[in-house]
Structures are given as C-alpha cells and as structure tokens.
C-alpha cells in the first residue's frame, strides 16, 4: 500500500541509512520493505508514536532488519525466494513434527545430529528442539529462563553445533523449530544484572517498582501461572531493592515491551535465530507480552500489535521463516494469534491447538465425545493460510481450558466436571487406571492442571504392572486413536518424544531439588535407547506403537485432503461415543476422506444415513490406514472399541 506519511518516513530513513548498509545489494530487502512499510509504520506508531525519539527509533528498526538481512546466508535467502513462490508450503500434509528436549533425547546437539535417522525412520520431518540457550545452573524452567540469547548452553554444545545440525537437517528435508522466549529473561541475563546494579537503562527493560503500590494493583486482576512454586506475580530483588514483575517463576523477569528498545532487541534476536537456519520459530508465552493494570495481562490488544509488527518485520528480512504462537488460552482468544487478516494484520502462521488437545483428553476420561463434539463445533474458524499444531502431549501440563458454556451445553457442571477429570487422570476416580499427577494446584481458585506421560495417562503403566494383556492392548489402542486424530484433523501433528515407544512416567526428577516441586518433569524423559531398540521386535509394546505410528504417518503423507485449507466439516451423528468429520478437496469434489473415531471401549455403530452426502450406497468404503473395508452391519458402520477409520470411497 502506498501512503504518503509512511513513504516520506521511509525516504528519510533510506537517505540517512548507514553507508555499510547502503553499499550492499539489497534488492529483495528493499522490495519487501516497500511492500510492508505502511504496516510497519502504522503499528510502530500506534505502539511508540508518542515519543520524541520516534524517528530515530524507526531508523534503528529498519537498520536492524537490514543488518540481519546482510548477514542472512545466501542459502537461506534462496530458500526465502523458493518459499515465496511456494507460499502454502507449511500447510502441506507432508509435515509431521516431534518436540523434544535435546538433553533428554540425545544428550547433546551433536548427539541429536547422530540420531536424525530415527526421525526419518518414523517419518518425522519437523523437529522442535526446546530451548538450548545458556540458562542459569539449577532452576531454569527447562531452558525457558534464558541468560544469553546468542549463546548455547555449554552442556549441549556450541553455536556451531546448531548451525551444523540445521545444515544436516536441511539436507534431509527436516525442518528445524527453535524457541525464542520473548516474554521474559532469566534473572541472570546481563540486562537483569545491569538493572540490579542500578542502571536505569536496563531497569527499563523490565517492570520494577520501589514499593508494593503498583504491584498490589496488578495483583488484583492477574491470575497466577505457577501458584505452587511461584505464587504471586512479583519478586523482591534484595540487591536492586525493588519489586520485579515475574509472572512465571521468580527467576523469570518479564520484559517491558512498552519500551521500544526491548522490542528492537527482541526483533534482532528473532532475526538472528532465523539466520542460524531455523525454519520455524516458536514464540513462547505470547499471550503475556503486554501488561495493563486492571486486566489479566493476557491477550491484550497490544500483544497482538507487537506480534503483527514482529511478523511484518520478519517478512522483510527472512520471509521463509514462519512463527508458531504458543498461547495456551481460551478457544476464542487462541485463534486471534493467527492475526486479524490474512494479509494486512498477520501474526503467527501456526498456533498450538490447546483446545483440541484438552478436548481429546476429555473424551478419554468420559469415554464419550459429547464435549469433544461441542468444543469443536464452537472452535472459531481460523484465517486463511494459517494452521494448527495438533498435539496429544507436550512438555507442559494439560490445562482444562474448555469454554464453560460448552461444558454446560453437555449437561455437565463446570466445576464438578473439571474435578472429575483431575480425579480421573490422577487415578483417584473409581476404575481409572491413569497415573497422572496434579500440577499448578491453586488453593484460591480450585484450579488444577495435569502432568503425566501419554502412556501413563492412558493406563499403560498400570496395565504393564498388573500384566493385564487386555488392558495393555486397550492402552495401545488409545495411544493410536489419539494420534489418528491429530494426524487427520487439519494442521501439523506434533508428536512428543518418547510417546512413539510408549514411554512411562519417570520419577527421577524428585531427587533433584530444582525440579522436585514441578511435576511436569514426570513426563520429560531421558530416552532409554536400549529400550527404544525394541521398536524392531514384534510383540513388544514399543513395536506395536512405533510400527503403527510409522504406518499412519506414511499414509497421512499420501492423503492430499489432509493438508490444511480449512477443509474440514464436523459431522454430527447420533451416537455419543463417536467423533466424525470429513476432509474434502476445495477443487476436486470426488476427493474426500471421512474420519470416524470411537472413544468408547466397546464397539459402536454409525448409522450410514447420519452421514448424509458424505456417503453413497453405490460405492464401497475402504479404510486407508488398514487398506481394508470396514465392517457394515444392518446399514451401520461398525467401529471396534477405541478404533478409528480414515475412510474413502473406492
Ligand atoms: C511456556 O508455557 C512454556 O511452554 C513452559 O514450559 C514455560 O514454563 C513457560 O512458558 C514459561 O516460559 O506461557 O502461553 O500451563 O502452558 O506456562 C502459555 C503452563 C505459556 C504453560 C504455560 C506456557
């Protein structure tokens, strides 16, 4: 868009630009800058326009983008051009992800590089390596408390190891996902150290206060994220003699984005990591970026403007890189992180589908699909060219963040229903064999979340202990059913490391004083590679899960309609144990796949009439995953207990 005010500013900036920038051939950079500058200017103006130094700040912003463009390796610039052409590249059904801790998966970064064949064996071609940056010894929230945004944790390796890993992954067509922890730094970051030493410049990078007046006002409306280990949202820093805002742990200091210097610093860091070869950047805790007294300090309008600005700037320097929004918030809030508009107010291309994850767990506990169907019916339609990250488990807890209205529509009482779910997954409910642990219990609000590995939550730990073969079989079926859902729903499926071989809870974190208060460590395993070898031995649990997932992944990659173009219809059927949806092709009406899942442990019937136009009596159905026709009895499709189908007409 051509608009005079922003164009004049752009001309001024380009006239004043440093010679080391103006001497370079930056053709593509300038084309993109011109295209995005109207947006960049208006967002930057809305956020920081009332400052006297606005023009200088705008100059710095553009120079930051230009300098990182100059540093962008030629290979990555070529990739940018290729992805500009193939702009829907990230919507393809070809991508299958896995998230892991480098240490727990492979010890070190070079160890991880040696294990790349494992991903290829399973069919994984997108790997999220959780934070590998320098962090405090002792408590570091699994790396989410960063002490240096440019240096690698020496336990894991060096920056060169990351570059080598990225190169090797690129050769093998595996995408690299890295985190940028944008909301906070560790209290050992040099910005924090300088703030503590009394430097006003760095104190302004954070939110700090000399007394409790303002903190107390904030506390009136701010919830607590880690109520057990880090109650309250402020921490007294003895050395600085001030209260610091620490929404997460007391060693994680929240960054102050009302300071434009913080924005430019963090943009610079994002572009730095784009230049190290990350294909996708996961922006941690984005809902929290803007703090306002009287609000929950989550999902604020300005948090969205910041993300739009980050996106517009990143598109100029590194347009091949896409963002994942990690915003574990209410369903209506979640979709807003894609942006308001697919072109002029874009935010993150990918977002965690925490709603679908929690709803799947509801179906596991209730063994019916009432809330799952209701929740998906209410899930707002997302923007074009935006896609979900669909997952069953991740390194965090399971929050029961459903919409209360949906719970009520299913004739459950919200407080009681959530209590039932917590009791179910912690094994307190009669007949439950789940082995989860409570996380984030909040005495004031009654809220509780759940920790535990997938296998332990679906009863595999119990089943193996008791040697109950039927129960072992059921747990495996549930693991496969849940993966069958994230692989077909629409979006990028993200597996969690260890789940592909049925890894159980691990208690060793209790011996570590820095971890024992945080039950999430129960499901952050160190992979036992000897045990993982059993994936090649038929008859073992590891084999049953691994080989089935491998097949499912291979089949998914062949099904075009599984690419995500908002091409899914939820199909409401009478049977309350079934979850049924159809995936269709926007241009080829004959290409469609019907997904039918049974969350009860007993066989269920699906009346074919319920399927309407999704079924025609003249063409037999075949299950693409098994390559067989499903059983039909008296005009009903029969689905075995915990079974699922990916059906197409043959
Ligand atoms: C994220 O988590 C990370 O995934 C966690 O591992 C970190 O502890 C946390 O940020 C702090 O860096 O911010 O938007 O229920 O879901 O803490 C959601 C807790 C987050 C997590 C929440 C989450």
Image (cartoon, rainbow, N blue to C red):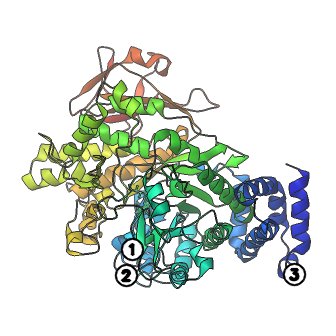
Instruction: Measure the alpha-carbon separation of dots 2 and 1.
Output: 7 Å
Q: Is residue 67 left or right of residue 552?
A: right
Q: Is residue 268 above or below residue 231?
A: below
Q: Say which residue label 3 marks.
A: 19
Q: Say which residue label 1 marks.
A: 140
Mark 2: C-beta under 8 Å from nearest atom of ligand 1 = no
Where does residue 603 sit, x and y in percent of width and height? 23, 28
Instruction: Measure the alpha-carbon separation of dots 1 and 3.
Output: 42 Å
Residues at discs 1 and 3 in contact (Cβ within 8 Å): no
Mark 1 or mark 3: which comes first in sequence? 3
Where does residue 335 sit, x and y in percent of width and height? 54, 42
Q: Say which residue label 2 marks.
A: 137
Which of 371 and 336 lies nearest the eye of the viewer?
A: 336
Picture quadrant of residue 646:
top left
Residues at discs 2 and 3 in contact (Cβ within 8 Å): no
Characterize the local packing of mark 1: few (<14), some (14-19) or many (20 or more) Cα atoms within 10 angstroms.
Answer: many
x 52%, y 50%: residue: 351
């Amino acid at each position: 868009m051509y608009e005079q005010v922003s164009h004049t500013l752009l001309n001024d900036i380009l006239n004043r630009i440093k010679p080391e920038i103006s001497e370079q051939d930056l053709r593509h950079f300038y084309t993109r800058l011109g295209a995005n500058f109207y947006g960049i200017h208006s967002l930057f103006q809305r956020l920081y326009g009332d400052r006297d130094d606005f023009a200088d700040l705008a100059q710095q912003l553009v120079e930051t983008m230009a300098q990182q463009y100059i540093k962008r390796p030629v290979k990555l610039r070529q990739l940018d051009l290729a992805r500009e052409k193939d702009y829907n590249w990230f919507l393809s059904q070809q991508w299958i992800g896995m998230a892991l801790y480098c240490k727990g998966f492979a010890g070190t970064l070079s160890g991880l590089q040696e294990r790349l064949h494992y991903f290829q064996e399973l069919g994984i071609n997108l790997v999220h390596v959780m934070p590998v940056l320098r962090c405090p010894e002792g408590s570091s929230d699994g790396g989410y408390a960063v002490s240096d945004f440019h240096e690698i944790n020496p336990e894991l390796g060096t920056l060169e190891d990351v570059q080598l890993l990225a190169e090797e992954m690129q050769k093998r067509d595996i995408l690299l996902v890295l985190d940028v922890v944008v909301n906070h730094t560790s209290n050992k970051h040099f910005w924090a150290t300088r703030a503590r030493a009394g430097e006003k410049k760095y104190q302004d990078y954070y939110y700090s206060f000399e007394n409790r007046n303002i903190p107390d006002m904030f506390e009136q409306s701010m919830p607590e994220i880690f109520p057990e280990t880090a109650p309250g949202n402020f921490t007294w820093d003895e050395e600085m003699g001030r209260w610091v805002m620490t929404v997460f742990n007391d060693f994680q200091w929240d960054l102050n984005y009302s300071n434009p210097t913080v924005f430019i610093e963090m943009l610079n860091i994002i572009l730095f990591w784009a230049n190290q070869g990350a294909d996708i950047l996961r922006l941690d805790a984005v809902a929290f970026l803007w703090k306002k007294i009287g609000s929950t300090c989550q999902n604020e309008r300005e948090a969205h403007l910041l993300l739009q600005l980050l996106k517009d700037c990143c598109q100029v320097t590194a347009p091949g890189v896409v963002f994942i929004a990690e915003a574990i918030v209410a369903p209506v809030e979640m979709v807003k992180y894609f942006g308001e508009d697919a072109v002029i107010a874009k935010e993150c291309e990918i977002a965690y589908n925490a709603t679908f994850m929690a709803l799947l767990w509801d179906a596991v506990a209730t063994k019916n699909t009432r809330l799952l169907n209701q929740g998906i019916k209410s899930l707002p339609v997302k923007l074009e060219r935006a896609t979900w990250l669909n997952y069953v488990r991740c390194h965090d807890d399971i929050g029961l963040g459903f919409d209360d209205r949906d719970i009520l529509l299913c004739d459950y009482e919200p407080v009681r229903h959530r209590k039932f779910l917590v009791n179910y997954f912690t094994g307190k409910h009669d007949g439950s064999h789940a082995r989860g642990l409570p996380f984030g219990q909040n005495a004031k609000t009654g809220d509780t979340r759940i920790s535990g590995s997938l296998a332990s939550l679906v009863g595999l730990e119990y089943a193996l202990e008791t040697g109950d073969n039927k129960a072992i079989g059921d747990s495996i079926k549930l693991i496969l059913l849940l993966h069958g859902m994230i692989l077909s729903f629409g979006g990028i499926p993200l597996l969690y490391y260890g789940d592909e071989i049925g890894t159980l809870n691990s208690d060793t974190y209790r011996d570590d004083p820095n971890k024992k208060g945080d039950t999430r460590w129960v499901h952050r395993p160190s992979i036992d590679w000897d045990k993982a070898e059993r994936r090649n031995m038929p008859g073992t649990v590891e084999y049953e899960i691994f080989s089935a997932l491998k097949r499912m992944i291979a089949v998914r990659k062949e099904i075009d309609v599984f690419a995500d173009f908002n091409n899914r219809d939820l199909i409401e059927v009478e049977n309350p144990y079934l979850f049924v949806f159809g995936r269709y092709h926007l241009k080829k009406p004959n290409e469609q796949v019907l997904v039918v899942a049974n969350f009860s442990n007993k066989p269920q019937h699906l009346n074919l009439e319920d399927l309407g136009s999704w079924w025609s009596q003249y063409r037999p159905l075949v299950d693409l995953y098994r390559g067989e026709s499903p059983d039909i009895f008296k005009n009903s499709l029969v689905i075995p207990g915990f079974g699922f189908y990916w059906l197409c007409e043959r």
